[in-house]
Amino acid sequence: LGDRSEEYHRQVGEYLEGISVLIAYGNFAHAYVEGAASAGVLQRIPCKTPEEAAINLKLVARKEDVVLFKASRGMHAEQVIEYFLNDKKEQEEL
């Protein structure tokens, strides 16, 4: 995305009208959060790492929720998904 990365990430956040929660991580998390604020997303959680994002996801996600992951391959979103799903399985087994 080059020199316009921050602008483009902010624009994606602006399209998030109607969602309940945004959990964003990485170098441009702040841009997503800013855009989501202008779209009216009430709960916006910027994170620094995939692990922090997974922890926050565990805190807010409920069984009936729909969760969308948007990331480039370099962002390692699969780490968030794996951490979240593995931890949920462990909780269900208890």
Image (cartoon, helix red, strand yellow):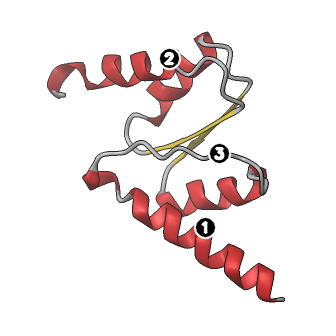
* Cα separation between marks 2 and 3: 17 Å
Q: Amino acid at mark 2?
A: Tyr
Quarter of the image with the C terminus is: bottom right
Sequence-wise, the earlier of marks 1 and 3 is 3
Residue bearing the label numbered 2: 15
Task: Name the disc covering residue 66, or none.
Answer: 3
Sequence-wise, the earlier of marks 2 and 3 is 2
Tag 1 secondary structure = helix
Q: Nearer the viewer, mark 2 or mark 3?
A: 3
Q: Residue at x 37, y 40 (%)?
A: 27
Q: Amino acid at mark 1?
A: Phe
Sequence-wise, the earlier of marks 2 and 1 is 2
Q: Residue at x 29, y 46 (%)?
A: 72
- Residue 68 at x, y percent in the picture: 53, 44
Mark 3 closeness class: few <14, some 14–19, many ≥20 residues within 10 Å: few
Judged from this view, the residue extending furthest toward the bottom is: 94
Q: Amino acid at mark 3?
A: Val
Tag 2 secondary structure = loop
